[in-house]
Image: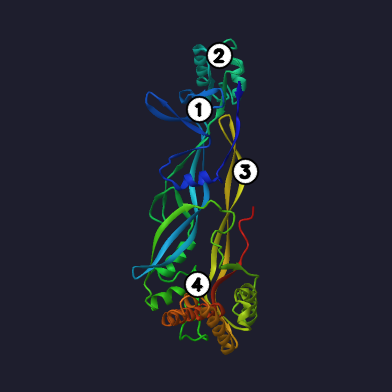
Amino acid sequence: MDITLDTAIDFSSSTFKQFLSDKAQPIFRFYDTEVRTVGGIEFEVALAPDGYEHDPDLDIRASDGSHFDNYNFLVEEVWRVYQKNGVIGRQRIVINSEASIEVRAPFGLFLKTGDGLTQEGRDHARALLQDYDADPAVHGPNIAAYVEKYRDPLLLTDEDYIVQPLIEAEVFDQFDPNRGFEDRLIDVDSRQRDWLFSVYGNDGPNPDLISTVDIIEGGSLDLPAPPLWQVVQEQQLKIGQKPVIRRVIEADGTPPEVDLFEAEVPAGTLDDTPQGRNAADQFLDKLLDDLVPSECGEMRKKNLRIMSALTWPEFRIRWKRVVIKIGCAKISIKVPLPQTRLSDKVVFVRFSIPKNVGVTLFKVAETCAIRSAIAAAVVGIVLANPGAAATSFNSLFKACIQRELQECIAPSLYVLKEVGEWFPKY
């Protein structure tokens, strides 16, 4: 007889995280299953090892106990941002959330197929396991010793059946006071969503979410920067938002909000001081200068600090194995350990134009004239239809001028951030 008491499960797997997001699945099974049809009715059973079959009627609970705990997962929310009924973009935020999970460990019995095992042997195996009680006052936690003591070797040999735990988890709805209804995943830290509501909604100022507009058209740089929510309201931008996606993040080891237009910078780079502004300029120059073609010549550049978001929370998950016991089953579980850090983010707008615009424009015009004149739409018809060729040339020339100048007038928007330390420490 093969009796397995130790096993391992993983809450970090993609399939388990997808299960957390799918309310249609009440229970997650940490074992493979197959569909069996009996009397025209399909039902799901554990996938048996080769040469054995699983009958769920023979499963037993070695203990009525289970393991119940709350675990943290990162949830991604995507909000559609709109203005005057027109969509202007999407805002992606991350919520540190909590799920209430119960782990159970019934034992599955797999009987050998074929004629080697009699019906009497099958009944003996079933009775043997159903009579088992893990209570120390009865049989004790060692199911293997119990089986060896009470098994009839004439009816049941060591090769006739396998016993192993069939681990399953159930997630329970909890009331989320932050959102006002029950859900599988409730808010633990929703500061990114709070920031979204404070800025785009009508919630007014939030002293814990510091975001300012550092420069506005016609404003004075000598005045204190107004909070972003105030600018949104004063300019009557009437920005709204609607949730369109909510799901557990699978790649949760790094802050999920980082993208191609965001970069970490050394401490002090974002200080609103001459030294900080110089450091930010140097960082942006190194980052973006290569985007301008060399034929544009020497460029005149300008960086504008547009908006600051201070104490912006970021999240990640670290994973650790812990061992629990349910009856006589010892289970190693990979569980999440959430971490948070606060970052300061500053939005910069940068543009550059050639210092000698006149010379650059003349070179661009010469290049475009040649390219447009020898284009197939001109050369191919110029002798037979000069008027049509002239029309094509004018159109191609103007499009070329616009395209080439766009390469030399390089605008960009970038987010620089200074990050804090992750906590708690593990």
Report, in whole angstroms, how far the alpha carbon at label 1 lies from the one at label 2.
27 Å
Using residue 57 as the reference point, say whether residue 417 is left or right of it: right
Q: Return the residue at label 2.
A: 116
Which label number is shown at residue 321?
Answer: 3
Which amino acid, by three-letter code, is at mark 4?
Answer: Ser
Q: Return the residue at label 1.
A: 61
Report, in whole angstroms, how far the alpha carbon at label 3 lies from the one at label 4.
39 Å
Q: Quadrant of residue 40?
A: top left
Of callouts 4 and 2, the N-terminal one: 2
Kindly check if marks 1 and 3 are in contact, taking CB atoms under 8 A apart as contact: no
Taking the view exactly as shown, the residue that stands out farthest to the top is 154
Which amino acid, by three-letter code, is at mark 3?
Answer: Arg
Residue drawn at (47%, 44%) of the image: 19
Q: Return the residue at label 4.
A: 211
Of callouts 1 and 2, the N-terminal one: 1
Report, in whole angstroms, how far the alpha carbon at label 4 lies from the one at label 2.
75 Å
Of callouts 2 and 3, the N-terminal one: 2
Of callouts 3 and 4, the N-terminal one: 4
Which amino acid, by three-letter code, is at mark 2?
Answer: Gly
Disc 4, SS: strand
In the image shown, does 290 or 86 lie closer to the viewer?
290
Residue drawn at (61%, 23%) of the image: 2
Residue 62 can be seen, yes or no: no
